[in-house]
Image (cartoon, grey):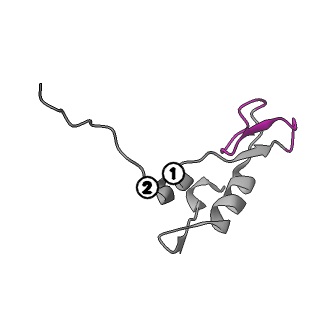
Amino acid sequence: MENKQSNDTVLDDNQKDASRVKIIDCPNCEESVPLSIYCLKCGFPMVDLMKEHMNEESVDGKDVKLEALSD
C-alpha cells in the first residue's frame, strides 16, 4: 500500500494563537460569549469592544482597523 499524504494543514504556534476565540462578558446580558460584532445571546452591538480588542493586537506589524463597521 502507498502512503498517501494527508491534506490536513499543520498550524504553527503563531497560527494557533491567531485562531483562538476570545471570550468576553457581554456588557448588556453579562453572559460569556465569543468576541464578535453582536452578542450571540442578546444581540447587543459590541462593535466598540471589538475595535478595542483588535486595535490592541497587530497583524503583520500593522494595526487592524475596523472603520467600515463604524457608523
* Residue 29 placement, left or right of 37: right
Residue at the spot x=54%, y=54% of the render? Answer: 18
Q: Quadrant of residue 25?
A: top right
Residue at the spot x=79%, y=37% of the render? Answer: 32
Quadrant of the drawing holding the N terminus: top left
Q: Which residue is mark 2?
A: 12
Residue at the spot x=70%, y=51% of the render? Answer: 47
> Furthest-left residue in view?
1
Q: Which residue is mark 1?
A: 16
Residue at the spot x=62%, y=45% of the render? Answer: 21
User: What is the chief secondary structure element of the magenta stretch?
Assistant: loop
| Residue type of the residue flagged with mark 2 | Asp
Q: Which mark is residue 2?
A: none
| Cβ atoms at labels 1 and 2 below 8 Å apart | yes
Residue 3 location in percent, x, y?
17, 32
SS of the residue at dot 1? Answer: helix
Residue 57 location in percent, x, y?
62, 66
Q: Residues within 10 Å of mark 1 (few under 14, many from 20)?
A: few
Residue 30 location in percent, x, y?
87, 38
Q: Quadrant of residue 53?
A: bottom right
Quadrant of the drawing holding the C terminus: bottom right
Q: In this picture, which residue range is highlighted in magenta?
A: 27-42
Q: Residues within 10 Å of mark 2 (few under 14, many from 20)?
A: few
> Furthest-bottom residue in view?
61
Residue 14 location in percent, x, y?
49, 59
| Residue type of the residue flagged with mark 1 | Lys
* Residue 51 placement, left or right of 17: right
